[in-house]
Amino acid sequence: MSIIKLRNYIRDEPQRPKGLQNRTPVLVSDSKGLTLRNYCPDFKFPFEQWCISGARTRDLLNIIKQRTTKALQRHGKILIYLWAGTCDITKKCGKEICIRNKDNITVNNIIRDYQSIIEYLEQFGADVILKIVDLPILSIQKWNTKHLRNNQIKPQDLQKYKDEDKI
């Protein structure tokens, strides 16, 4: 989602529900979450963020394990939005973005890590709700063209879309 689209969405779409908030939202993500934090003022969208730039799904699983108990003590009930997988599929190659692997190992690892997160959070019962946010469809070619003027990345986009669709 581009910054302009995100600003327009924030301006036009979300309305804070009336009444009491009974769960604290927690965003668990890689650098996408950091970008979101920069464009969502806390007074309009108050949520806790457990975001690490470049974090893979396994890293986010570890963060969830480390922080969930303390978050429950602090907030009572939480709603975790898990927005992970982009850094599992792609990586930085210098200034470019490229596909990490061209086989199903990465996809299988992401699915396994999602299952581990679900199993871990089940022990907290109704105090924790998990929502898995779809991987964003990002164009590697557009990113690299915008940043490097390199137009030879299109096959990687097709592989990335196939991987995201499997997840």
Image (cartoon, grey):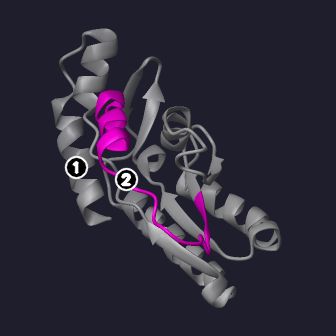
- Tell me the quarter of the image containing the N terminus: top left
- Amino acid tagged 1: Tyr
Residue 10 to residue 115: above or below: above
Residue 84 to residue 155: above or below: below
Circle 2 crowding by C-alpha within 10 Å: few under 14, some 14–19, many from 20: few
**Identity of the residue furthest to the top in this view:** 149
Secondary structure under the numbered disc 2 in the rendered image: loop
Q: Can residue 157 be seen in this view?
A: yes
Out of 104 and 132, give the one closest to the viewer: 132
- What residue lies at 74% left-to-right and 76% top-to-bottom? 76
- Tell me the quarter of the image containing the C terminus: bottom left
Where residue 73 sits, quadrant-wise, is bottom right
Range shown magenta: 1-26
Residue to which mark 2 is pinned: 14
Q: Is residue 86 left or right of residue 9?
A: right
Image coords of residue 45 (percent x, y): 53, 49
